[in-house]
Amino acid sequence: MRATEENAVVMNSGITKLSVGVGLVFVGLLLIHWLPFSPAVTYAVVFVSTSLIFLWFALVLRSSEPSRRFILLAVIVSLFVQLSFLNLSPIGSDDVYRYMWDGKVQASGINPYHYFPNDTRLDTLHSSLIPASVNHPDMKSVYFPLSQWIFCACYRLSNESIWGYKLILLIAQIATIAGLFALLKKLRVLPKYVLLYALCPLPILQFGLDAHIDAAGLSLLIFGLVLYLDGKKVLSYILFALSISIKPVALLLLPLLFLQEREVREKAKVVVVPSIILAGEFLPYVFHSNPFEALFTFASHWTFNGVVFETLDLYLVNNQTSRLLCAALLIVSLLLLYRSKKGVLDKLYYSVLLLLLFSPVVHPWYVSWLTVLLPFARRWSGIVYSAAASVTAYTIVQYKLYGSWEQSALVLALEYLPVVILMVIELRDARKDPQAVSA
């Protein structure tokens, strides 16, 4: 009897701590509306503080047993917090204004890959907001066709008001969380772990506040995994291709699925189905423009927050050489990972983590592609990374207040050193016990 009572006390204590953690995350996020600082400082304070609370929350979650009602309530409140950001201007990024411009161009029946925003031939589309608020207005669009169609739908919904874009992304967030519940059920993982995504400040701020299109890609990826586990492989390949159309992170999954299949016909489907979908998307554009022009420019010159790249470039002092070496190291790392005996989902998690470590550009919303895998991966490397990405807000503050966009070596160390250490420990311990380092 005494043991039972002690267990009940421990359980109640865990739920209390969990409730406090949920409440602190939500209150902290809502401070975006009320803190009396400049927007950039407010963003940094909220992002960093709620991310630290999230780390504590993840630790408490491991030893707690919340009811399904508690989990659903926490998810609903999380969505309402994001809804409260509907009319707030973005702070950490101005990418949504490029979405808005591309949507307006496409809604006007113009190929979004044909002209750059400042082109005088599009002067009739110019307004006081766009393309004046578009970053790099002398550069053509970098986004794939599916993203362009979403931008067009958002523009038709709210024109140059930001709420339409955020509403569509909120719907995508709801779909992602619903997909995670379904995926966890199929994997027989406790539903409480959906909170590792639903309550993480990173996707809430990057999608709810700054309105990044990645939210749509995450929902397609998760439902693709659900369909794959259901045995509906062709449909899953279609969704993976559509996810790649938002951001090509899901490309990492295709080799894993290819190696999983034993029959040549099934292997062919992994390659052919996504190829047909992607080719079909680009077909209306390729005869009148080069949809990849801006993407090649971006891939050749842009850098930010890439730990391996920044470290190599410090010594090589050559952008292209550093990029090529990062690409080579990533390919070798992925080949070693793909040949390991880990399961497909574990390989997917670590392949995304490796991509982020070796990429020359890692904006905080890129990390959401790892965060969305946490409910079933439950690895501390990803949990810490999803929180530590908040320190990149330092660069935003420096830029907004002083006009200086500089990568800080200290910020890189604070963000990546714990992640790399945890990853090494996880990979080492996984040989002994695959669950040893799970949350």
Image (spheres, rainbow, N blue to C red):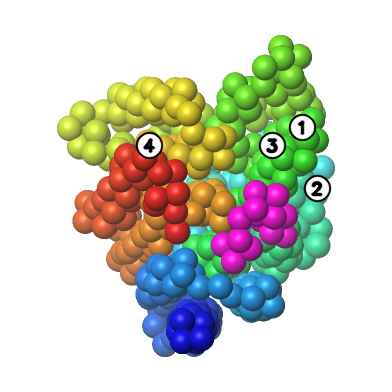
Comparing 199 with 72, the one in front is 72
- Left or right, 169 with respect to 414, comes to right
Residue topped by disc 4:
431
Q: Is residue 266 above or below residue 76?
A: above
- Separation of residues labelled 1 and 4 (CA atoms): 30 Å
Give the x, y percent position of residue 293: 57, 29
The vertical placement of 343 against 271, above or below, is below
| Sequence-wise first label, 1 or 4 | 1
Q: Would you say the residues marked 3 and 1 are in contact, meaning their CB atoms lie under 8 Å apart?
A: no
- Say which residue appears at 54% left-offset and 35% top-offset: 343
Q: Quadrant of residue 255?
A: top right
Q: Tag 3 or tag 2, which sits nearer the N-term?
A: 2
Q: Which mark is residue 240?
A: 3
Mark 1 or mark 4, which is nearer to you? 4
How many numbered discs?
Answer: 4
Question: Which residue is the site of mark 2?
Answer: 108
Please name whichever residue, 259 or 174, is drawn nearer the observer in this view of the structure: 259
